[in-house]
Image: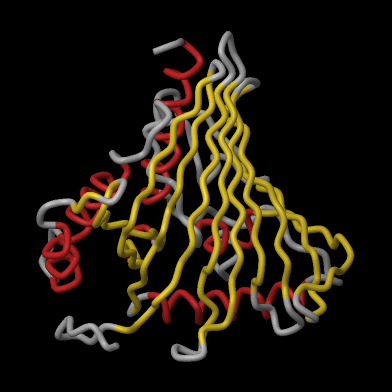
Amino acid sequence: MEPARRRICSALVALVMALPAVRVFPSVIQPSESLSPLLARTGASVDRLEDGYSRIVGAEDYLQTVQTGGRTQSRHLESEVFFVRIVESSAWMMVRNVLKVDGRAVPGARDRIMAALADRSPGRTARLRALADEGARYNIGGLQRNFSDPILALTFVDSSRQPRFSFKADGQTIVDGTPLYRLLFEERTRPTLIRNGRTGESIPSNGTLELSEDGQVRRSELNVEVDQQTTAGIRVRFDPDPKLEILVPTLMEEDYRVAGRADTVITCKAVYSDFRRFETAVRIVP
């Protein structure tokens, strides 16, 4: 593996491994007064949304394409996904349980998600992380990442984490006939929520949110610069689900770029559908 690709392998794995272990640090930056009401509504909206996500499971259709040195490779994953809260760190993550790889069924995959949803034992968090890592091993591109998560940027604007960021109004836009506020965010507090696991170096996040008047996040864009040669971006669209009566992710697009002797570009597109609730007894409700 070329040096640049080795760097991004270890660096981006470190990004995800750092996230579940984060803790909320004291506030050092407060949002401007003009944005405070909108941010308060956004924080309350995200807090409610995260609570709703704790009881749903959905389907993901995920296409990955890698271009490097004039060569192109692709992979198609079909998965079930669900969202879990890591109580000890107040963090959220999505668990991807891969059912099929390029059309071929993964043995025992359907049993794993039911066991994970039913698990209430003390070691549940470690087993969920292991399941997330299991799904990540099917990624291609020499990039051992398990941070492809549509709700990652949402966790940055929940009420407990907003003080870590600065926010700036960036006008308005209209999506599907709905006017949305554009909001730029940039992480200011150190150490950052995302860090390089090899060096412990902070990797600040920045991006854009598009919000409705009531503070619901309809679009998110998250960007990180791992080093001078490596960047990553995740863009997500959220739409109302008429059955669940909450906003759910419907589209996630990613790009990872590594500059070097043979530039590598990884682009991914995930489409989400068929979200449904599960009950305490782990019976999936159609």
Up the image or down, 44 lies above or below 26; here it is below
Q: Residue at x 38, y 47 (%)?
A: 76
Image location (x, y in percent) of residue 187: 66, 47
Give 127 or 271, whichever is nearer the viewer: 271
- Using the image, determine if residue 67 lies above or below residue 273: above
Nearer to us in this view, 185 or 105:
105
> Which residue is drawn at the image coordinates 57% and 29% (left, top)?
265
Position of 147 relative to 180 (above/below): above
Q: Nearer the viewer, residue 188 or 215?
A: 215
Query: What percent of the width, then of the height, locates residue 167?
Result: 76, 58
Position of residue 273 measured from the top left corner of the image (x, y, whole percent):
44, 72
Report the number of discs: 0
In the rendered view, tell whether residue 12 sits above or below residue 235.
above
Position of 71 with respect to 13 (left or right) is right
Question: Residue 18: percent from the left, percent from the top?
Answer: 40, 42
Specify the quadrant of the image occupied by residue 236: bottom right
Q: Which one is in front, 72 or 203?
A: 72
Residue at the image point whose x is 32% and y is 43% from the top: 136
Residue 160 left/right relative to 199: right
Residue in view at x 52 percent, y 68 percent? 249
